[in-house]
Image (cartoon, grey):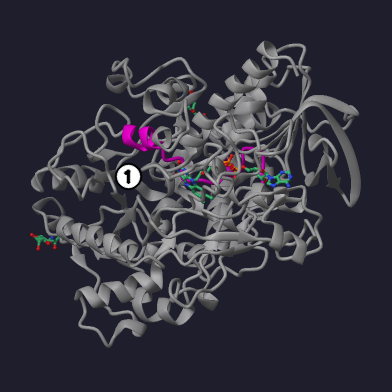
């Protein structure tokens, strides 16, 4: 049985279209072989444990009923929460339909999270080239990974747990979204939280310890994590719990993991309820159309395709679209809900003319601000995948492989009021204990052009490096998602010039300079930290290190950091750009809701997984209220 890990690792890591440069597969396989030869009990345990994990995922239901009370489209972050909460009502029958397949225990290994982007578990979207951004990426396109697997993007994400700021949600409320102020949403963050960091768990106002979703620090830390906090102090900042009273300043990473293992939304919300007979989960099935009665404008079911066969299933109460910020607007538009002109052009009969696909937002970051160290304190792929470390991870779930995508620290800044202790952050720094050069797949995931990589990063592949990732949180530029055809199997077009509003470029430059300052602190200098200074070929005409040089670098390498949101915006009736009302019902169509990151009206200062879980918790309560208190 334990021989199965080798094919598993290798098949899983098959990069279908992309040949990985330095062959990590070979490396892994070599180590695993060596490991097999050693033949230890822990390998058996790792596989036994992994297999047990598989078995706890709800099974793929073959016998679908003709009708359910609720159909949830998409088993991602929001879909898993909803499926759990709605099936608590024993006489409601719930169907969850997911386009992707089951989770796999290789997906649980935190350090290699990026690798999942090469697998079938990723939709592999790309932005349309704009000529203004992503200039250093192949064909001028930034990649937009999305989870296509049970758990959705929570199964391929970096596990970073951040809620955002109280002011973010108070702004949602001020826009007319009653019930979405911070005081209203906090209980829904707490509802599923299991804060496992003891000292934070004691802070009862901001944390809970009895929910489904574990939040903890990674079990392993490099010396750079501590250097980061010390550097913060040197710069006059505090060390805080960014999910506590104040968000600004420095912290170790809080992650949705447990015992060194990823805790996806499926693992948290579906595994424990796999025996509920009123919940059916259908996998590898793509919903292609929402069935809507044209006369009454009432949703009554969906069509889905599995193995080239078409199925129809009806919903007695509601269809809930939780397909994520790219696929939810796509599905609405395919079903006749969207901008009239765009739909007519594609020959789709319009049921409701709404601003679907507009308001695409993200946080913008850059992963190429690299610093070289003179001591071996960072994470490198070669070390991490050594047999010793593989062995340690398999036996104890500790060691370098337990660090989520090499992210170890976070800092939030409020550039408008830098001395305000409460803070309303617009900028963030992420500490990566490695870089593009220390990983054979980072370059491929970001799609950085080969020649740029060879010139700039190849020379430091053997070095220990770290990256300070500058991130903007209050971005002004907006993108748009359009259908490319009426075929549901065609990827939509994603237009997103995220520096269209020059203020976004300037704020990213501001936080980039903070990162440069960070490297100059005693805490980092003691490891010999120095800025990697081979200029990007396309920016050579600017003086290296000048503002114009960095602006050029940002146009080359900045990318949306995969927190896509806003494309089915929530807003009050008077807001013409709103697609759903504050109870998340689609305007003008009955018995249809959207519940996922696409309803976000203004992106919060948070990586969006926790906010999406909150949104789904809140929606579940709205749905329960609407169907138990009102007569329909
Ligand atoms: C690589 C990556 C790293 C990230 N890192 C972090 C992080 O560290 N921390 C954080 O907070 N956030 C992170 N995010 C963002 C976060 O994971 C997402 O914001 C969140 O998961 C969105 O949840 P959702 O429910 O809106 O969509 P998803 O979780 O994407 O779920 C949508 C689901 O619907 C399915 N689906 C889509 N269309 C159909 C259809 N037509 N029929 C059937 N099923 C369909 C999809 O397969 C998917 O499973 C990351 C995202 C990515 C991609
Ligand atoms: C963590 O995982 C290891 C390896 O499977 C296991 O031996 C250990 O009991 C787990 N610890 C906890 C607290 O679950
Ligand atoms: C690394 O650089 C720092 C700062 O320049 C220096 O103090 C230290 O001795 C160097 N360490 C090594 C091992 O070279």
Determine whether 315 is above or below 383 in the image: above
The C terminus: image quadrant: top right
Front one among 80 and 480: 480
Some atom of ligand 1 lies within 8 Å of the CB belonging to the residue at label 1: no
Determine whether 544 is above or below 323 in the image: below
Q: Is residue 466 left or right of residue 125?
A: left
Q: Residues within 10 Å of mark 1 (few under 14, many from 20)?
A: many
Residue 71 coordinates in the image, percent (x, y): 76, 31
Front one among 314 and 198: 314
Determine whether 313 is above or below 355 in the image: above
Q: Is residue 398 left or right of residue 226?
A: right
Determine if the magenta segment contains residue 168.
Answer: yes
At x 43% / y 21%, what residue is drawn?
190
At x 45% / y 47%, what residue is drawn?
111
Q: Secondary structure at mark 1?
A: strand
Front one among 516 and 330: 330
Q: Which residue position is annotated with label 1?
A: 408
Front one among 588 and 532: 588
Residue 330 coordinates in the image, percent (x, y): 69, 53
Q: Quadrant of residue 3?
A: top right
Determine whether 241 is above or below 141 in the image: above
Q: Is residue 48 shown to the viewer in this render?
A: no
Q: Quadrant of residue 55?
A: top right
Task: Please give the range of residues in magenta.
Answer: 148-171
Q: Is residue 323 left or right of residue 555?
A: right
Where does ligand 1 appear, by image quarter?
Answer: top right
Q: Is residue 155 shown to the viewer in this render?
A: yes
Residue 202 coordinates in the image, percent (x, y): 29, 15
Q: Residue extending furthest bottom?
A: 541
């Amino acid at each position: 049985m334990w021989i199965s890990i080798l094919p598993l690792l290798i098949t899983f890591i098959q990069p279908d279209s992309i040949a990985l440069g330095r062959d990590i597969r070979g490396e892994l396989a070599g180590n695993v072989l060596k490991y097999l030869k050693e033949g230890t009990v822990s390998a058996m345990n790792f596989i036994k444990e992994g297999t047990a994990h598989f078995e706890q995922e709800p099974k793929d239901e073959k016998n679908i009923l003709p009708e359910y009370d609720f159909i949830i489209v998409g088993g991602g972050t929001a879909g898993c929460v909803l499926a759990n909460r709605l099936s608590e009502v024993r006489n409601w029958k719930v169907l969850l339909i997911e386009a992707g397949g089951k989770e796999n225990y290789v997906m649980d290994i935190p350090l290699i999270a990026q690798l999942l982007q090469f697998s079938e578990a990723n939709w592999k979207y790309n932005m349309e080239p704009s000529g203004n951004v992503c200039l250093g990426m192949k064909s001028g396109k930034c990649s937009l990974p999305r989870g296509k697997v049970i758990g959705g993007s929570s199964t391929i994400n970096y596990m970073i747990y951040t809620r955002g700021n109280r002011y973010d949600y108070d702004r949602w409320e001020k826009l007319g979204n009653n019930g979405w102020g911070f005081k209203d949403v906090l209980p829904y963050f707490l509802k599923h939280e299991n804060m496992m960091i003891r000292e934070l768990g004691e802070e009862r106002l901001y944390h809970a310890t009895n929910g489904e979703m574990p939040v903890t620090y990674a079990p392993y830390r490099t010396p750079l994590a501590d250097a980061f906090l010390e550097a913060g102090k040197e710069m006059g900042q505090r060390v805080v719990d960014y999910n506590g009273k104040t968000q600004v300043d420095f912290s170790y990473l809080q992650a949705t993991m447990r015992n060194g293992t990823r805790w996806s939304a499926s693992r948290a919300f579906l595994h424990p309820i796999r025996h509920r007979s009123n919940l059916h989960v259908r996998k590898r099935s793509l919903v292609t159309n929402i069935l809507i009665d044209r006369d009454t404008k009432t949703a009554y079911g969906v069509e889905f395709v599995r193995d080239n066969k078409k199925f129809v299933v009806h919903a007695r109460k509601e269809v809930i679209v939780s397909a994520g910020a790219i696929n939810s607007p796509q599905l609405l538009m395919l079903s006749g809900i969207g901008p009239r002109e765009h739909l007519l052009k594609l020959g789709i009969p319009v049921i409701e003319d709404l601003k679907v696909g507009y308001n695409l937002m993200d946080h913008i970051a850059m992963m190429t601000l690299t610093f070289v160290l003179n001591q071996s304190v960072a994470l490198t792929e070669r070390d991490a995948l050594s047999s010793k470390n593989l062995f340690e991870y398999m036996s104890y779930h500790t060691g370098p492989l337990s660090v989520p995508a090499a992210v170890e620290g976070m800092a939030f800044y409020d550039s408008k009021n830098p001395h305000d202790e409460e803070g309303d952050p617009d900028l963030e720094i992420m500490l990566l204990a490695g870089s593009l050069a220390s990983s054979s797949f980072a370059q491929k995931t970001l799609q950085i052009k080969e020649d740029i990589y060879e010139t700039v990063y190849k020379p430091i592949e053997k070095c220990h490096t770290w990256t300070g990732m500058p991130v903007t949180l209050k971005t002004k530029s907006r993108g748009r998602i359009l259908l490319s055809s009426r075929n549901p199997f065609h990827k939509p077009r994603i237009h997103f010039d995220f520096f269209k509003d020059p203020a976004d470029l300037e704020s990213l430059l501001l936080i980039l300079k903070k990162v440069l300052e960070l490297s100059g602190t005693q805490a980092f200098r003691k490891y010999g930290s120095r800025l990697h200074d081979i200029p990007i070929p396309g920016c050579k005409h600017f003086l290296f290190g000048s503002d114009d040089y960095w602006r050029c670098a940002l146009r080359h390498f900045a990318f949306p950091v995969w927190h896509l949101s806003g494309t089915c915006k929530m807003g009050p009736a008077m807001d013409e750009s709103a697609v759903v009302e504050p109870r998340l019902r689609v305007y003008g169509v009955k018995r249809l809701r959207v519940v996922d990151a696409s309803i976000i009206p203004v992106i919060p200062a948070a990586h969006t997984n926790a906010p999406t879980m909150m949104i789904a918790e809140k929606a579940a309560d709205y749905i329960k209220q609407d169907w138990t208190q009102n007569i329909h």
